[in-house]
Amino acid sequence: MTTANDAMLKTERQPWGLRDTIWTALILLGSYFAWDVFGSLMDVYEIGILIGTAIFWIWFGRYWPSIQPFTYATALLSLLAIWTYVQNDNAYSVSETAFFLKFLVSSQSAIMWMSALFVLSTVAYFGGLFGKSESVSKFATFLAWAGSVMGSVGMMVRWNESYLINPDYGHIPVSSLYEVFILFAVMTTLIYLFYEQRMRTRAMGGFVMLIVSASVAFLLWYTFDRGAHEIQPLVPALKSYWMKIHVPANFVGYGAFSIAAMVGIAYLIVAKLQEKNPNSDFVQRMPSLESMDDLMYKTIALGFAWFTIATVLGAMWAAEAWGGYWSWDPKETWALIVWLNYAAWLHIRMSKGWRGKPMAWWAVIGLLITTFAFLGVNMFLSGLHSYGEL
Amino acid sequence: MPNPTPEKAPKKHRRIQWLPFLGSMNLAVTLLMMLAIASVIGTVLQQNQAFQDYIIKFGPFWTQVFNSLGLFHVYGAAWFILVLLFLLISTGVCVSRNAPGFLKDMKQYSEGLSLNAYKHQPQSVTYTPENFDSEQAEKLLQQQGYKVRLHERDDGLTVAGMKGRWNRWGYILTHVSIIVICIGGLLDSNLLLKARELTGNLAPETRSVPLGEIPQKSWVGSDNFSFRGTVNVAEGQKSDVLFLPYDRGFLVQKLPFTIDVKDFRIEYYDTGMPKNYASDLVLTAPELEEPIEKTIEVNKPLYYKNYAIYQSSFGDGGSKLDLKVHPLLAREFKPLEMNTSVDQVETINTPVGKYRIEFNDFKLHNIIPASEEEQNETGKKMHNNGPSIVFKVRNDQGKAWEYENFMTPDKQDGRWFFMTGMRTSTAEPFRYLFLPADEGRGLDRFFEYLTLINDPERTQATLNDALPAEGVDERTHQMQLKLMNQLLMLFRRQGFNGITSFVEENVPPEEQKRVRDYYINQTSLALQTLYLSVLEKEETQDLESISEFNKQWFEDAMVVLNSLSNYGPPLYFELENFTHIQSTGLQITKSPGKDVVYFGSTLLIIGVFFLFYLRQKRLWLAFDNHHQTLTIAGKDTKPLPETEKEFNRLVEAIQAQTGIKQ
């Protein structure tokens, strides 16, 4: 017991080690390289974003060491893809012929790998939970990590490919509904993996990966039925550095809210079964109701904080693109509705001390509201924010 | 409030009943949810539409109900503002009630409590240490991020630690930020204009009239505190006014500067999608020695003082149009020349009445998705139909027909056509006629042919020459020619349907089929004969073998002639030439509240992080001199599941330092 506690104290205050030095050096090197090669194409804000990202990523790698191998894997595979393109005179068409690109790291292949890995991970998490197998659960975690790596490789390579198709088209791949769905799947999985480590349980993995699998299903339909994976140039309104910060911030929010809702569902199931039979195997294997309730709070707090940032950034961008920071545009208004909903949730919990079932139900309903803000507005309501219509 | 005067005491008593309600969480959450629901309504129900559209959608009854509830302008409705106001008051009361306590609590180490009080804290452990050194304990707590105070009690020593007290600032910052943001928004609202409207100093203009005719009451001076409006300026023109949408009309805002638009440009991707919109502007103001020259783009506005000028839209700025007007009933091919421009109105007198022509728009490109065949052929996904004009033709009674005519022919199924679309209501899509182009890709042959059909004398002569009397007497021949002429007139007026209905009305039923077949046969013969004479005149045609092209042309022309009677007023406008003049849509804002809102937003973000990620924790080490025991007590302001664990960990660390006497 004591040793476990010591270990916990250690993870909290780890001294600076060789690992951190290498990490920092590589991030600085990578950022410098990016600036050296592409600096002439960036405006002052984009250089600011690059510096900010580097600092944040150095800190984040120390705060959550697991992100270090994730970053290394993403970088190596992305570089492999870029290198293969360079070997073939940067012709986009080689994504169909060059071996590595065709089967592994062209953006389409990487995204297909991500899709498969995430679905397998979901199955494995549930398999581990119901088959009472710790090793299967561990494998599920590995699959989730691998899927996240492939997803982020897909996005990185897609970024490069957009410039290969036509330098005019080039943009960070967070501009269309197709692209942000990849971002959503990766982001949600990473946030979940973070809490999986913190909570030391893999029992909720299946529930959370269920929503990631749902987004993968949508992604596949969107690819094969609508051909949405084709890289399109940006509409003038989206040509701005704001996109690089507004969209990712938003998806930390969406991802965290989704996890809260899926944990809410797990909570409700466990609570129901516990009433029937408190000693059932399933209830024993799931985390305690209290800790799930706490995780809901933590993810909603995280989501709320980032969603606030994203909405403020969105307002600032709107002020620059449309001349007003707030126009009661449907997307803006629904962002406000989502924000108000979670603000109410947090108020009730923090001030009134509500816990348990009603809050779990509310978190689930919150996801419906969030989904409408994310997808429904694009599908049913018109407005200024009509990118990536279905 | 120390020492309230006796008179005021009862008043204060009454206020106390109100304040808990206004500051209550129930009210706050209710208001948050009301705001959310109102916002939902505002997005589901399209806002600020024309009243007529609502009636079509909901019927008169519900339109009335919705309107009286303000649902068509939710975000400006009195009740919506009231909810916002209550939320502000509620937040304000909440902050003013809690903040002083919280600020005090931030400094409160509670180092002066009794030993017994520490033993009753949420977390508490008492044991006998081997040696307790308060300085060492202080260091340990400081290492863990605690701020420490020492207190000598009668019966011992207390080391009191606290960390995460900025959490309390999180509460204050988030709530104050909401008030700040609302105030910022209020600064940018049109409340002052509303007030001026109420006192009768201001009345929005609802007609669309030239600037000079707008009454002074609809003008707003450049002293206006905040505004957001748009203005369309043509290339080469300038503006020092702005139009502010207001209620169901608009106001004219005087600007303290003048904007010249030198040029407006649209750049395109190779797909045909617009890539960028840009305007070259020159801003002159009395206080400026040198005018400011800047190119604005979407996402790259021009800031001048507290004004911002945005690229918002674009349109036609009065492009010059050189037209040929073809009267469709004319008997000779002699089109009228017309030089006009977009936004101009012209009148034309014709034998069938006087028409007003309103030129509404000119488009340089009409880019549409390419058909599958074309995509396979050229590999391009988009297709450009070329320049077009949109205009309305209005008769004396005011009935209008709207047209869309393309300047250049477009290839369809391997043939070239001039497209002309017509509709009588903007709710309908255009229905198109496809005028076949001749071999020179022009319309000459079409109008040669049409004017020939229109002219009974030339028709008569042509038919006479081409169809000699063979095997019939002269009288029968003349009658046949006369019949042909009459059939042609009927055909021109109503197409083949006209001939069919003429037969149905005038011929006994048993004869109808025979007569109709004969008439249509004769009409076709006449039309073919006339067509051959047109071809002969072109001198390009060896009459023995009519080329595929000319056969096809005839078929296509027949389709057009057959439905020409549904084309509205008998005029065709051919766009010969143009000078493209664009206008840029500028949005100009003066937004003094913007920085206030941004400041509030910054407070909000900082506050949210303080609130969620700093936990206010207190820890006490109270040494009892009597029993030589140490009491470790802890308290979290907001206990979490990990509170207990963290406390135990700290206790272990302290115990490791002091040792435990068995």
Image (cartoon, coloured by chain):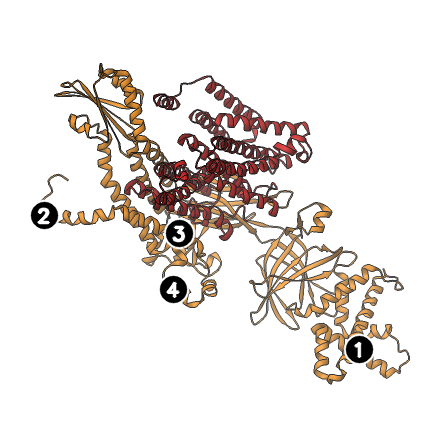
- Badge 2: chain ID: B
Chain hosting mark 3: B
**Callout 1: SS:** helix
Q: Colour of chain B?
A: orange
Res A89 → quadrant: top right
Separation of marks 2 and 4 at Cα, in angstroms: 49 Å
Q: Nearer the viewer, mark 2 or mark 1?
A: 1
Residue A104 visible in the snapshot: yes
Q: CA distance from mark 3 to mark 1?
A: 69 Å
Reading the chain from its start, which is encountered first: label 2 or label 1? 2
For label 2, count other residues whose C-alpha is less than 10 Å away and answer few (under 14), some (14-19) or many (20+). few
Between marks 3 and 4, how big is the CA–CA gap? 18 Å
Tell which tag, 3 or 1, sits nearer the viewer. Answer: 3
Q: Are marks 1 and 4 on the same chain?
A: yes
Chain to which mark 1 belongs: B
Q: Is residue B290 visible?
A: no
Parent chain of label 4: B
Q: Label 1, on which residue?
A: B518
Q: For mark 3, what is the residue?
A: B39
Instruction: Please state if A288 lies on the left or on the right of A220 as rendered.
Output: left
Give yes or no for contact between labels 3 and 1 (Cβ–Cβ under 8 Å). no
Residue visible at 86% across and 73% down in the picture: B465
Front residue (pair A245, B431)? A245
Q: Tell me whether circle 3 and circle 4 mark residues in contact (CB < 8 Å).
A: no
Q: Earlier in the sequence, mark 1 or mark 4?
A: 4
> Dot 2 corresponds to which residue?
B7
Circle nearer the N terminus (3, 2): 2
